[in-house]
Amino acid sequence: MIIALLGALLISAGLAALFIQLWVSIKQRATTRVPVGDPWDARGLEWSIPAPPPEYNFAVLPQVGRRDAFYWRKQNNGAYKPADHYRDIEVPKNSMCGVLVGLGATACFFGLVWHIWWLAFCGFALTIGTIITRSFMRDVVRIIPAAKVEAHDRRWLETAAAALPVPRQLELTPENEGLARCQPK
Amino acid sequence: MSAEITDPELLDAGLNVAREPREFREHAESDVLGFWVFLMSDAVIFALLFSIYGTMGNATAGGPVPQHEFKFHSAFWETALLLTSSFTYGMVSLSLKHARHRIWPALWLGVTFCLGAGFLIMEVHDFFTLFHDGATPERSGYFSSFFVLVGTHGCHVFSGLIWIVLMGIQIAVFGLDQRTRLNLIRLGLFWHFLDIIWVVIFSVVYLGALIK
């Protein structure tokens, strides 16, 4: 009983830390935003796109020839360049299905844990019903035209070109717009 | 050049992906791979249930014992029904590839449904006989593990039957469009997977009891 209580308190503290982090981040968003996306001279490709990322993530699928592709590109002056050719990108349309499946499953398992059988049954029916309905939906993707992708990407590249490259020691200051000054090897 | 197993036309027999646009081939590959991942997680569940069953072999607690309770002719016919249904599902996949009209996959799907339903009816009948003889899940550790293992497989077959009905409706409504064919490929993987699990159940549970 005592141990379970301590565990519950520990988990609550973890959750509280999450919400405090959210609150602080939202409050300080004006000074901490890094639209160019690479606040700390990173290596992986996930830092080579804007922050927050566009819904399609990469404007053009990156070709990876070696480890630390983004770092290598920065070293060799290959980063923040427009692509030769932009393509249409297919993304899923917005849909309530995922939310309904999650809600139904939560209700179902809550009902199972606490022996609330009608709730468990309704949650199960909602989850399965949504999955079945989804399998009958056909028009579920949307095309983002290449022109739109290109415009968006070029606007971001302008932001990057206008940004001040920050060295290591200024990373934590509001000067940091997400463009790192590349460290010599 | 010799045909590699990774050639698109060999990847998914029923999809005829070679004639489809590149985007669909990519979708098909990742969708089918995703379903394989699901099946492997399902296989982990069955592996756990089998290991529990293995440890419960003698835990009959003075109650009914499997070698007296099991009806082996019934297990034989259940196996025959399910194996045949796997064959008829193979005909669904073949007719997806070669038939000119959607009636053929739908027809073989119907045959598969009947065989699967026959299997399930026989299994439920067996369960009722066991219950009547006092071999219930709460009677002994052995029958707990038996019912949860064989029952889980039966639940899978039941959901497979619902899925077959839904696919019949999708064929009627949409014809054999890309999504319907992809769904049929995944249902096929599911159905054959259940068949494999049943072969293990038959060997371990029923033949295992016969050896005693």
Image (spheres, coloured by chain):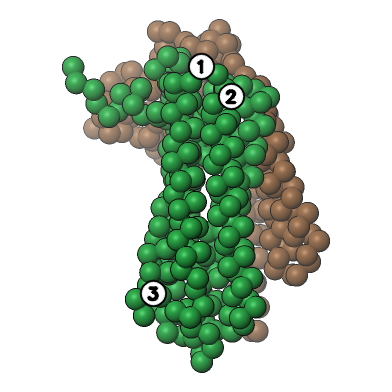
Chain colours: A brown, B green
Residue occupying the point 71% across, 58% down: A108
Q: Position of residue B207 (x, y in %)?
A: 38, 69
Horizontal side of A66 relative to A58 (left or right) equals: left
Label 1 or label 3, whichever comes before in sequence order: 1
What is the chain identity of the residue bearing mark 1?
Answer: B
Q: Does residue A175 appear in this view?
A: no
Q: Amino acid at mark 1?
A: Arg
Name the residue tied to disc 2: B103
Q: In this figure, what is the number of numbered marks?
A: 3
Label 3 or label 2, whichever comes before in sequence order: 2
Name the residue tied to disc 3: B210
Q: Do the numbered discs 1 and 3 sit on residues whose CB atoms are within 8 Å?
A: no
The N terminus of chain B: image quadrant: top left
Q: Secondary structure at mark 3?
A: helix
Q: Which mark is residue B100?
A: 1
C-alpha gap between disc 1 and disc 3: 47 Å
Picture layout, residue B55 above or below residue B84: below
Q: Does residue B196 appear in this view?
A: yes
C-alpha gap between disc 3 and disc 2: 43 Å
Q: Secondary structure at mark 2?
A: helix
Q: Amino acid at mark 2?
A: Ile
Question: For the view shown, which residue lies furthest in the bottom direction?
Answer: B62
Mark 1 closeness class: few <14, some 14–19, many ≥20 residues within 10 Å? few
Q: Secondary structure at mark 1?
A: loop
Q: Which mark is residue B152?
A: none
Residue A44 image-quadrant placement: top left
Question: For the view shown, which residue lies furthest in the right direction?
Answer: A118
